[in-house]
Every structure is written in structure tokens, then in C-alpha cells.
Amino acid sequence: MKLRYVKTLREVRRLQQLYAAPAFEQFRGLSATFRTDPEVIAAILPPPLEPADEPIASAGVSWIGRSNTLQPFGAGGLNVRCRYEGIVGDYPVTMPMSTDSAVVFGRELYGEPKKVADIRVRRDGDEITGTIERYGVAYIEIRGRVAGRLRAGESRETSRFYFKFMPAPDGRGFDNDPVLVRVRHTGRTRLVERLEGELLLRESPHDPVADIPVRELLGLTYSEGDTYTHGEILTRVPGESFLPYMFGKIDDLELLAEETAG
């Protein structure tokens, strides 16, 4: 008897190939880079991650048109610059996605801090806007007007760091110590445009991006292209040191309970 919940060895091998080399193509999106407070970055980074030389953060809103693993979906996030043993990369504080499939894929594979959100990228001539909305709040918004074109082509390799873990079944701590995951990003751009505009990080109790202040906007861009990812485990992290950060990728459970009781 063949049950679709149980895969054959051949099916398992094909799925493992997809997990090993995800491809996210035909993306179009906005990115904003900004300077924030060094003490904020130092406080938000779980050990063993450390702040980079400058207190740089970034936000993005994108739409991915084709993938070898998922249907088209919206993606976004807020990242802070950091380092681990000489490797400079970004630590994503939050990574909203527009579909549950996109949330599940990245959370289970890499430990990405994903939530379902309403994500939109709109272009009207030279005016471009990207928004991420949850609970009726557009808590991340990037909007700008095209001011010039930049060089496109092969993208330099970049790194992102995630903590992959599962809460213990009894609700206290973890079922095993978290692992620090590095995901390498490569790809290419076909179009890159410089924008003049603004980044708005609005107050939201479940997505408190407003806690990371925008002190100086360093650049806004709109780009189109493809990106590819590959993950690896760097080290295992003592659970006790990660406890203060483990609830950062979920909504405020106490507030949700209060809203339900009210």
C-alpha cells in the first residue's frame, strides 16, 4: 500500500536535494540600510554572535515569483549586522512571509524567525512601495522614487545567522541545546535602482521593530534577480544563554491571552 504520508527512498532523495539547494528566483524587492544605536544591536544579539564594527541594520520587502520549493510568495524582514569568529553577516530579528508554506520551510530547515504576514510590493512608474502588515499594522514600510540605476550582475556571497531550536515538551527550556546556523546567499541581479525615499518602522506589540531606531538612512534600493541559499551548522549553543531570546520569533502569548479574555 502506498501512502503519501510515507515517502519512498527515491522520493526522500529528491526532497533532500531540494532542501540542500533552495532556489528563489524572479524576485523583486526593496531594501533599506540604516545606522542604529550600537547598544541596541549589542542587546539584541544572542551569544556567541557579536556586533560588527558599525551599528548597521537593514529592512527588506520582496516578492519571489518562482522557486524550486514553494509557490510565489512575499518575504521581508529586519536584520542587524554582526559577526561570528571573523565571519561578518546579518542576524534576522524577524522574517515575515506571506504563506504558511514559506514560513514552515525556512523555520524547519534553517530555524528562521518567520511569521505569516500580508506582504505587498507595488510599482507605479518610478514610485515603488513595499509593506509588511500584521494585525492591521503596516509595521514595516519602504517607499521611494527611482533616482538612478546601479550596476547589476553576480551578487557577492553574504551570510545570515539563525538559531535553530525546539522548546521542550514540558514548556521549560529546550528539548536540546540550540544550534547556530549559517546560511550563505549567492545569486544575481538583473536590475538595481537607487531610490530616494524613507523607511518606516511602526509600533506593533507583536512585531516590535520600532525598538530598533533608524538614526541615519544610508541607502534605499529596488532590485530584481535570483538568489540561492545553502545552510550549515556552526556550533551548538548552551540553552541557558539563549533563553532570553527564544520567544523573539513568536507573538506575545500573554497579550494574546489578554485580548482573548477581553
Image (spheres, grey):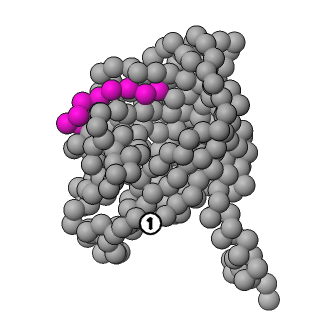
Question: Was residue 11 drawn as part of the magenta stretch in this picture?
Answer: no
State the image quarter where residue 259 is shown: top left
Q: Which residue is mark 1?
A: 233
Residue 44 spot, x, y in % from top left: 27, 45
| Residue 216 or residue 114, whichever sits in front | 216
Residue 222 spot, x, y in % from top left: 59, 25
| Residue 248 or residue 205, whichever sits in front | 248
Asked if residue 22 is positioned above or below residue 148 in the image, the reply reads below
Question: Was residue 34 drawn as part of the magenta stretch in this picture?
Answer: yes
The structure residue drawn at horizontal position 34% and vertical position 48%, both measured from the top left corner, is 83
Q: What range of the chain is rendered magenta?
A: 32-40
Kind of residue sitting beneath label 1: Ile
Q: Label 1's element?
A: strand
Say whether residue 17 is left or right of residue 161: right
State the image quarter where residue 163 is shown: bottom left
| Residue 144 or residue 57, whichever sits in front | 57
* Residue 99 visible in rendering: no
The structure residue drawn at horizontal position 49% and vertical position 64%, both measured from the top left corner, is 232
Residue 137 spot, x, y in % from top left: 44, 30
